[in-house]
Amino acid sequence: MAAAIDHWHQLMETRDPAGLVDLIADDCVFQSPAVHTPQVGKAITIKYLSAAQAVLGTPSFRYVEEWIGASSAVLEFALDMDGVHVNGVDIIHWNAADKITSFRVMIRPVKALQAVMPAMAAVLADGA
């Protein structure tokens, strides 16, 4: 497995957003399923990923499939959030230094996205 993905899995297991500082590239681009414009930069990417860990990091969160290439991966996840089944993918790219340069999240079905969006907005508003 790729070092960047190994590192990502460790952070997801420990629920330690502080570890993102070492994993995210300065010029990382984060793409949210709920925000039209890409979010550019390390700080904003860490903010969104930390909020996602807070919202989606329930005991039921699990990665169910992975497809890993030379410098990119697709990680399919599933969880139950307040009785709503959430299914999605993290599409991750990294550079030669094993720093994540692009992180795109897609969530389905619509009901799941409708449950995730206000929860993420609340955490982001609190300064996650």
Image (spheres, rainbow, N blue to C red):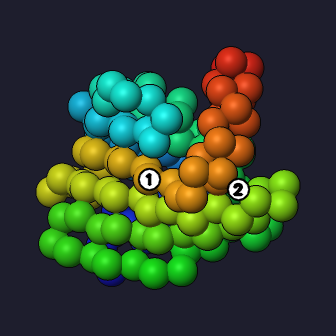
Image spot of residue 24 (x, y percent): 37, 43
Q: Is residue 49 left or right of residue 67?
A: right
What crowding class fits label 1: few (fewer than 14 Cα within 10 Å), some (14-19), or many (20 or more)?
A: some
The residue singled out by tag 1 in the image is 106
Q: Residue at x 61, y 69 (%)?
A: 78
Residue at x-position 24% and y-position 55%: 94
Q: Judging from the image, what secondary structure is the residue with disc 1 in? A: strand
Query: Between marks 2 and 1, how big is the CA–CA gap?
Result: 16 Å
Q: Quarter holding the N terminus?
A: bottom left
- Report x, y in % for residue 79: 69, 66
Given residues 19 and 61, the one toward you in this image is 61
Element carrying mark 2: loop
Q: Position of residue 123 (x, y in %)?
A: 71, 29
Residue 125 versus residue 80 in the image, above or below: above
In the rendering, which numbered label is found on residue 57? 2
Q: Position of residue 29 (x, y in %)?
A: 29, 36
Residue 10 appearing in the image: no
At a point 42% along the width and 69% down the height, the residue shown is 75
Residue 127 sits in quarter? top right
Q: Nearer the viewer, residue 96 or 115?
A: 115
Disc 1 residue type (three-letter) = Met
- Which residue extends farthest front? 110
